[in-house]
Amino acid sequence: MRPHVVILGAGFAGLECATRLSETAPDAVRVTLIDRNESWYFGYSKLEVMLGRQTAAEGLLHYRDIAKPGVEFRRETVTAIDLPARRVTTDAGVHDADHLVIAMGADYDFDATPGFREGGHEYYTMGGAERLRDALSDFQGGRVLISVLGQPFKCPPAPFEGNFLLHEHFTQRGIRDRVQMTTTFPMQRPVPVTGEVSQMFRDALAARGIEERPQTLVTRIDPGARVAHTKDGDELPYDLFIGIPVHRAPQPLEGWLPVDQGNLRTEHAGVYAVGDVSTGARTVPKAGIFAEAAARVVADDILAEIGIGEAPAPYEGWGICYAEFGDGLVSKVEVNFLRGDSPVAERREPSHAFAAEKAQFGASRRARWFGA
């Protein structure tokens, strides 16, 4: 009987792991890919929805289109995971795995910041991006406060991409001179990969007249008074509040899953944690490109365990990150988090050429995972 690989979550990590197993050894393993949703979208498509450049439906990729030998997709909600037994319970039944890959991403805790659910906006969910789009259409000027509400959070550049794209949006509408933009975040600097990378984002904020307030954590907002309160006791007035919500491990997990970062194995035999849901001794950002690279290591490690191929080289936390700067400009950062003693990154300034490269990045994944 073929070993059964159960993959929980069909984002960057789950899709790549299933695809890698299928293309390498379609007859050697049986893969069950489980996700609670019927479709998926690239995270950056939410920025397009926020700006009204794309509808939510236009960005959807449907799991029903997955046609990989040896892979079965099941739309189910995970209700319990017995890690030592590699047993998964869902709303539709029980799945016993020989190899269990947990790639469920991260969820959001909107109630962790009092007042945020009632009086704030966000673009980290598709519904939130749609609501913010509608709010922006009615916004005629005032104080815009964009705040990172906790760490860790998905896609380190995304809060600053939002700043740059909103600056472009207000400029195109002819109201930028009536908008005061401020961004707060708990880190010492934006996108703290290396000093050089952070400086690229700091220079861009300054060039666009966006006030930067590092090491500032908004802990609650008062929607009635339109005031954000910080951990240090400051009060920040706003007319439009946009927050990057606090992230938490997805249910039914009780927390992030520690792994050996070289092979993504957990302490439980045959159980891996990949992407946003995992944690380790050193920081690797919660971003799709890193999850995808880690998933290839996991797939190859599973195959080596059953006697197909050699054990993979250790995961290095390598990835290429594209970031939107507005006006059709996209930057590119190539980074490795785990190979040396500290992260090493190559920063490349925003250009239209990298915008085209980013588009090709998305197109290649759509074709690889969905045949689209």
Image: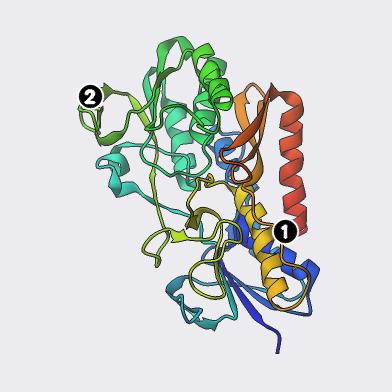
Q: Nearer the viewer, residue 77 or 59?
A: 77
Q: Is residue 11 above or below residue 88?
A: above
Colour convention: rainbow
Question: What is the three-letter code of the residue carrying label 2?
Answer: Asp
Q: Is residue 209 above or below residue 268?
A: above
* Dot in front, 1 or 2: 2
Q: Is residue 198 left or right of residue 68?
A: left
Percent x, y of residue 60: 63, 52
Exactly how many numbered labels are in the figure?
A: 2
Q: Is residue 252 above or below residue 322?
A: below
Q: Nearer the viewer, residue 302 or 32?
A: 302
Q: Residue at x 49, y 80 (%)?
A: 92
Residue 66 in view in this figure: no
- Image mark for residue 369: 1
- Image mark for residue 334: none
Q: Residue at the bottom extreme?
A: 1
Q: CA distance from mark 1 to mark 2?
A: 47 Å
Q: Is residue 220 left or right of residue 16?
A: left
Q: Residue at x 70, y 90 (%)?
A: 1
> In what element is the residue under mark 2?
loop
Percent x, y of residue 307: 75, 78
Number of other residues with Cα within 10 Å of mark 2, as a class: few under 14, some 14 to 19, many 20 or more? few
Q: Is residue 92 left or right of residue 361?
A: left
Asked if the residue under mark 2 is in contact with the one under mark 1, i.e. CB atoms within 8 Å, the reply is no
Q: Residue at x 59, y 40 (%)?
A: 44
- Image mark for residue 234: 2
Q: Residue at x 64, y 49 (%)?
A: 316
Q: Residue at the top extreme?
A: 177
